[in-house]
């Protein structure tokens, strides 16, 4: 009888250990995913969706509307971040050198760092890492606004063509792929010079 009871406890202990191991694996997997706000996670932008403009507050707090539509070949890149996102802290130094390099190599590309931080906190975060990019805070907009949907996942990057159509989206750590997409989208939107004179 005592042996049966002991085996029963051993089986329960073994089951609990297995469940604890599964729980740790799940915790590790979920922790490695980008930060997603559960309030707006159901609504996301898909490649092909059109966003003609976005609204937000600049660093000085002024409310502004920024068009994502432009001349042929125009590309807009939005970098979604949040100062309390640990994954943003991981990519922030790489973003700093990326922003500096991009200003020199592709100055015609419109680049914005968009966040739900208040303007002052956003500016302090950008300064901490030496970012040279325009900031847009969408903290005071409604949770169902398109701007809030853009910042529901961080660090994340969205690339729009000259018609404001989302052409590419990627994790913020994939900077090489992002720049390849920017170059491709920009080239695809330019008029065909060979056929223009015919």
Image (cartoon, grey):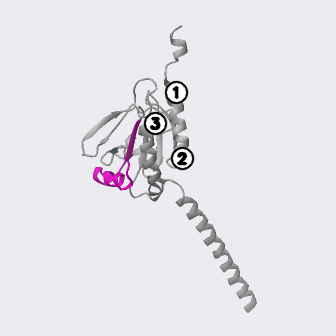
Percent across and percent down for residue 48 are: 51, 32
Q: Which residue is mark 1?
A: 187
Q: Which residue is mark 3?
A: 105
**104 to 89, vertically: above or below:** above
Of the numbered discs 2 and 3, the one sitting upstream in the chain is: 3
Q: Residue at x 37, y 43 (%)?
A: 133
Percent across and percent down for residue 146 are: 39, 40
Is disc 2 surrounded by few (<14), some (14 to 19) or many (20+) residues within 10 Å? few
Q: Is residue 171 visible?
A: yes
Of the numbered discs 2 and 1, the one sitting upstream in the chain is: 2
Q: Is residue 178 left or right of residue 110?
A: right
**What is the CA distance from the residue labelled 2 to the residue labelled 3?**
18 Å
Of the numbered discs 1 and 3, the one sitting upstream in the chain is: 3
Q: Which residue is mark 2?
A: 174
- Tag 3, which secondary structure? helix
Query: Is-magenta flag for residue 122?
Result: yes
Residue sitting nearer the eye, 170 or 129: 129
Q: Residue at x 54, y 12 (%)?
A: 195
Q: Is residue 19 left or right of residue 111?
A: right
Q: Is residue 170 left or right of residue 115?
A: right
């Amino acid at each position: 009888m005592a042996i049966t009871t002991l085996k029963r406890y051993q089986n329960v202990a073994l089951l609990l250990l297995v469940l604890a191991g599964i729980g740790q694996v799940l915790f590790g997997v979920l922790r490695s995913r980008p930060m997603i706000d559960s309030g707006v996670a159901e609504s996301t932008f898909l490649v092909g969706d059109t966003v003609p403009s976005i609204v937000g507050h600049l660093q000085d707090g002024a409310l502004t509307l920024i068009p994502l539509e432009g001349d042929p070949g125009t590309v807009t890149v939005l970098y979604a971040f949040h100062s309390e996102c640990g994954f943003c802290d991981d990519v922030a130094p790489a973003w700093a050198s990326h922003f500096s390099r991009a200003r020199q190599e592709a100055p015609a590309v419109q680049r914005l760092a968009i966040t739900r931080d208040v303007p002052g906190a956003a500016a302090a975060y950008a300064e901490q890492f030496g970012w040279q990019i325009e900031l847009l805070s969408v903290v005071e907009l409604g949770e169902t606004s398109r701007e809030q949907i853009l910042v529901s996942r961080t660090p994340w990057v969205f690339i729009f063509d000259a018609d404001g159509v989302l052409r590419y989206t990627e994790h913020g750590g994939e900077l090489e792929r992002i720049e390849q997409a920017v170059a491709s989208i920009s080239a695809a939107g330019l008029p065909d010079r060979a056929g223009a004179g015919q």
